[in-house]
Image: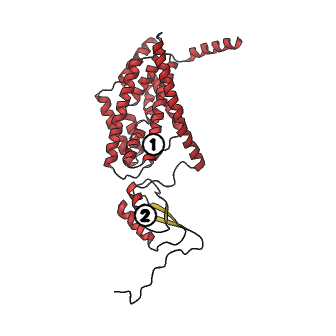
Amino acid sequence: MKQDNLKARWLERLGYRLPTLERKDRIALQERVETGSHGGVDFLVMMVLSSGLASLGLLEGSTAVVIGAMLVAPLMGPLIGAGLALAQGNLQLFRRSISVALLGLLAGFAVSIVMGFLNPGFEPSLEVEARGSPDILDLGVAVLSGFVAAYALGRPGVANTLAGVAIAAALVPPLCVIGIGLTNDQVLVAANSAVLLLTNLVAIILAAGGAFMVLGIRNVSKESAVHGWVRGTVLVLAMVALVLLLPLMINVVEQKRQGQSKPLTYPVAAHVYEAVVEYIETIPEVTLVTIGRVSVEPASSVSILLATPGTYPAGIKDELTRLVHDVRGGSPSVRIVILQEVGKEQVIPMPEATPESIP
């Protein structure tokens, strides 16, 4: 009994401390969210432009351009609207917000597909690689971003923090990585970016709904159907979040096992990789261990690691260097290391020229 009274007093004191909204503030909040959740021509135009900007930034590896795309992307608006709809039990607002968000996602995905086709054989930049390995920390970022965004909308005095929230949430870059990756045979990067995007979407909606409830917005309807769809939707979103925890935790374990999340080399373009593999397959007992760039700079040198249990042709390094230059373009530095069993001859001796063999 004492515990129940103590709990009741604690909740009462907490209620006084929480910055709940007055009626006029709730009306103003409703208007702001309704405006942000409206999927008109301006929304589509901004979504297309921000997706194009993000795609170019990802392809160039420009952090500043990617941040600029985050700032102008309008996708946060309908997600916050969905969170408010859950807090209010407003099914109409929820349906409209989700529809607008899906429309924006499709528009951004289409733009990234076009950008990917216009840039075939691109070599993934550090910005692309960063979206290709999400972990549990990204889920925490998404939850806090959704909560802060909803809180800032409800408290006009802190609304100037929304720009920082847009950067933290990072909705458009992983969306664009999906399209760019799929069009350039970077399936694993695209799949991991899809996990990151879905994690952000679900976490932001749930966290925004929670933030609005903290601000005093409640579902006052007495109809059981209203409470039913809210509970069902929250349950589905929570289950999706739990399912997403599996790949996020796997990435955490892999990063701890490998000891370094930043790769020592970065992938080369698909056509460069395929050309090197095709050449190596013509040489008996020589296998390709790995090939990569040492940095994300356009003129980055290329490292190739080969292995053989026996001997290898003397001219293989020169041939590979010429091949990389021809396929990749330019004259990047090519470093080739060949692992060989101890005790084996290092190279196949070239036949000596004799007077009879000279035409």
Say which residue label 1 marks: 191
* Label 1 – label 2 distance at C-alpha: 32 Å
Which quadrant, please, contains the N terminus? top right
Disc 2 target residue:
333
Say which amino acid is labelled 2. Ser
Task: Indicate the position of residue 348 as horizontal and vertical percent values.
Answer: 49, 76
Where is 191 relative to 42, above or below? below
Which residue shows up at 39% across the image and 35% down it? 71
Residue lying farthest bottom? 355
Q: How many marks?
A: 2
**Residue 108: percent from left, percent from top:** 35, 37
Q: Please, is residue 62 above or below residue 69 in the view?
A: below
Above-or-below relation of 71 to 308: above
Q: Residue furthest right?
A: 2
* Residue 105 visible to an observer of this rendering: yes
* Residue appearing at x 57%, y 15% in the figure: 15
Measured as percent of width and height from the top left, residue 188 is found at 46, 46
Task: Label 1: state its secondary structure.
Answer: helix
Q: Nearer the viewer, residue 222 or 112?
A: 222
